Amino acid sequence: MPTEAAFSGTPDPDGTTAEASLGRALELRRKGLPLEALIELQAIISRHPDSAEAHHQKGNILKSLFRFAEARASLGEAARLAPQNAAIWLNLGVACLELRRLDESVDAFRRAIDLEPDRPEARNAFGTVLLQQGLVTEAAAQFEKALQLRPGYAAAHDNMGRVMKAQGRSAEALACHRAALEREPKATTHSNLLYTLNFVEGLPPEEILAEHRRWAELYAGPHGPEWRPVPLRPAQEPGRRKLRVGYVSPDFCNHAVAFFFEPVLSSHDRERFETVCYSDTRVPDQVTGRLRSHAWQWRNIAGWSDDLADALIRSDRIDILVDLAGHTAHNRLSVFGGRPAPVQVSWLGYPNTTGLPAIGYRLTDAVCDPPGLTERWHTEALVRLPQGFSCYLPPAESPPVGPLPALSAGHVTFGCFNHVAKLTPAAVELWAGILGDLPGSRLMLKSRGLTDPGTIARIRNEFEGRGVAGGRIELRGEDLPTAGHLGLYNRVDIALDTFPYNGTTTTCEALWMGVPVVALAGDTHVARVSASLLTRLGAADLIAASAEDYRSLCLALAADLPRLAERRALQRDRMRASPICDAAGFTRGLEEAYLRMWAGRPSESEGRPAEAQRA
């Protein structure tokens, strides 16, 4: 009900009081009828334009429908009318955060906290926007305050896990996510835990698989009593209808996934395939528009329930449904648990198993997942594509490759632009040793979290504790346009890949900018991605089998600057001509894999998974 004297109490012409109308609108929302509630609220606003609470509730409903720009306008009007209402400022801050209007979001959350400093939700929300700005230490202070106010606050424990990961403290992040799950079991929190497992050194793959299976058992079952799996339809034959492939992702926007998905979507054979994109993208952008232009059909499922998304996919008669997110943010794996398509596949957005028995296949390649090595750590059957697990679309804004920096700088500069979460103690130890072997060398690290004073101090201390002076480490955290970001590679001679969680986009970017990437190949998919990319580039000589081998490769590259300069000058052309950038060739291989899956024989050597047999 209204939180301020919004109405005079005078009945409307039909005899209904405005308070009663607002109550009816809120009841409609509680019943799951948000559009009907919006109509009721708009009618109230037309009669009582100064009702802050009507604007407030309208904004909240628009926010729940992912109509964030409209929500921001309504909540802004509510804040103007009732500037002392902390709840309004809090909801306005959330809408601005979703729109990535981060400065506005900060201002709104500060107002909410000034009005109600002991409201833990405001502290938690404020910490979230600070974390997005890279102000990790300040964000941690807000989450800690939220936990002081409400010790069992699961969302704040979960967010503290995100803080720890952003500081490269992934093992501690796991403890925070587990604390959140103990207080409130939740699919999104559990996915955060699963994602974090990929960053931690030394975890047995069997334990990681077991945790993924547990997620599926808890959150990915049938949707209701009427649930039924979709049976396989007759296999495609000449002259029959095209095979219909659905792609599901929250990342159909300016996101790393788009660099690898757009070339495939634009290259699909429209004579044989119909592509349907199920977009859960919260804030569409120019990339969204490009992707939409390439799809046969586009479905916006942002804000939809699992049941509604399931029903839509079934009605579209999708043959093969492909998840592009895995256990990353805003995933819709729970929709796949309902089995709305007869063949379901995991690909691209997540470097591990989903854990879902309902997903029959996972797309990979023979380098990321060598036959006989990693099958036992997946619930899906592995389908190895002939040209690698992905292809890359270089940004149109890419600057030219510059000359080898060491020739003018007088020293070698190593670089790593991966997320701070991937900077494990073992990687820091190895890199410090390499810098120790080359006394004049430098290291440039670039990651969003490196604007935070606490994170900067921690990383400098890690290297100084291993004998590397802080002045030799350059830390860059600014959010640059694409051209500026890639242009920094023109100051890097050799890129250092992270382990056990390799780079993917960062590896491609470095290679595209002429910088060789030294990678350590591990025993699991997440630790072999760069090895796959380097193999396809024809640069397998940069793949190390051990930490000592990694160190030797770096020192050998640094010792022969003429050869390093020649390699740099030729590398972009080599990459452009390689399978990494061959969208047409990659997509033909992918399509053949889809046809084999549909026929129940993914490859000559890989059998049909049990789930597909039961379909």
Image (cartoon, helix red, strand yellow):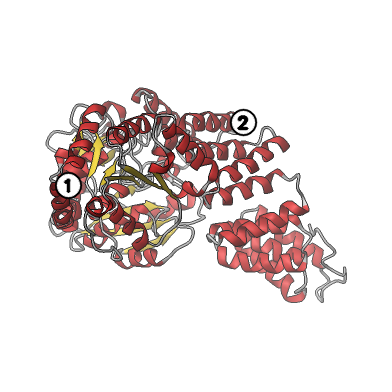
Residue bearing the label numbered 1 = 561
Residue 61, position in %: x, y?
63, 60
Residue 443, position in %: x, y?
34, 43
- The quadrant holding residue 495 is top left
Query: Relative to 546, does residue 62 appear above or below in the rendering?
Result: below
Element class at badge 1: helix
Residue bearing the label numbered 2 = 183
In terms of depth relative to the viewer, which is nearer, 411 or 426? 411
* Type of amino acid under label 2: Arg
* Type of amino acid under label 1: Leu
* Mark 2 vs mark 1, CA separation in Å: 56 Å
The N terminus, quarter of image: bottom right
- The residue located at (43%, 65%) in the rendering is 285
Tally of numbered tags: 2
Quick one: label 1, few (<14), some, or many (20+) residues within 10 Å?
Answer: some
In terms of depth relative to the viewer, which is nearer, 329 or 493? 493
Quick one: label 2, few (<14), some, or many (20+) residues within 10 Å?
Answer: few
